[in-house]
Amino acid sequence: MPTTMFLRHCWAALLVLLVTAPAVAADHTVVLMYHRFGEDDVPLTNIRLEQFEAHLEHLEAEGYSVLPLATVLDALADGEPLPEKAVAITADDAYLSVMTEAWPRLKARGWPMTLFVATDPVDQGLRRYLSWDQIRQLRDEGMEIGGHSASHGHITFMDPAAARADVARGMERLQTELGQSPDVFAYPFGEYSLRLRKVISDMGFRAAFGQHSGAVGRRRDRFDLPRFAMNERYGEISRFRTAVGTRPLPVHDATPAETQLEAGSRPTFAFRLDDGLRPGAVTCYHSTGSGAVDLDIEGDRVAFQAPAPLQPGRSRFNCTLPDGAGGWYWFGRQFVALGGKD
């Protein structure tokens, strides 16, 4: 049996043991997203090693179950329970420090990881990126591999045919080099639109992840899945504790459905709250403002306007509600307007 298949069976068996124990059943998990580890000269995409070690120590001390992303998606799709404290760890782009810094620390604890690979930088042999030999080694040691396009460009602004060609080219390289075609995808920069989501769905992926915050639950669209992004600024242990302790805010009818918006606009965002939760206890923040926004609440509907016109590039909002047990329900969305630079 291939190593990756064997490990997946082992994790599935472990999950059964975990979720049959009393008082651990849940219908959600938190997915963490990293890029670089210990590359302190690029703080926007880096997590300092002392921060990362603090994250792992917290997960270990608090009894979290670190699960493969495939196991999480299987459980959510099949309606199977998950451990109450469950997280999955992912990294984007295929930087070398995943292998030299992150993976040894995870392996020492027997914890899995998913790596979303953008293939052009690997093919070009760019500095600080993994090679194909190294990615094969990680795969053979049990790391899951996901798709992340070929170019790692702003594919949401491409026409659908061009976006599909870029993603397909990346998948072909993964098939050629690794002998596998992943069924999970991470949008480059976390940017997506309705038409890009359709492209990814039509290509046969089972799920796609962005870079907006929130816990992953059964109700969330499988092509709009959130991850908590960790970098030097947002990687302090207080924020990490909050992130891994969140659960999905149960909402429906979120508008606007489209996440590709017009620069200069001030859209109104809205959603309806499920499960009898109190809309009046919700607090929302938008990236164009400096504090909590004013909410317009009518029945179970929560609405607010962007505090300032959207600038080209990415913007996001986060809405939270106390869960009554010291944690938070969380709902986040990311949007993008043409013209952004990174």
Image: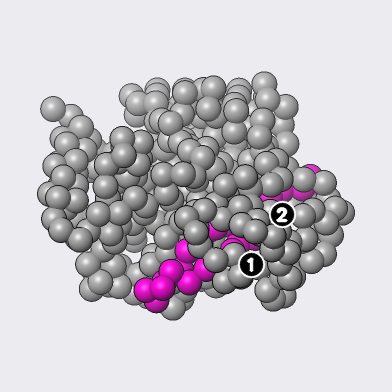
Amino acid tagged 1: Cys
Tag 1 secondary structure = strand
Mark pair 2, 1: CA separation: 10 Å
Q: Are marks 2 and 1 in contact (CB under 8 Å)?
A: yes
Q: Position of residue 99 (x, y in %)?
A: 34, 52
Is residue 295 found left or right of 88 in the rendered image?
right
Residue sitting at 61 percent across and 70 percent down? 280
Tag 2 secondary structure = strand
Vertical relation: 5 (above or below) 35: above
Does residue 261 show up?
yes
Q: Position of residue 266 (x, y in %)?
A: 83, 56
Read off the residue under disc 2: 269
Q: Is the stretch drawn in magenta largely helix, strand or loop? A: strand
Residue sitting at 14 percent across and 42 percent down? 13
Q: Position of residue 220 (x, y in %)?
A: 49, 44
Q: Earlier in the sequence, mark 2 or mark 1?
A: 2
Structural crowding at the residue carrying mark 1, measured as other residues with C-alpha within 10 Å and reported as few (<14), some (14–19) or many (≥20): many
Which mark, residue 149? Answer: none
Vertical relation: 44 (above or below) 66: below
Magenta residues, start to end: 314-339
Q: Check the picture and name the quadrant holding the C terminus.
A: bottom right
Amino acid tagged 2: Phe
Read off the residue under disc 1: 284
| Foreground residue among 335 and 187 | 335
Residue sitting at 46 percent across and 29 percent down? 205
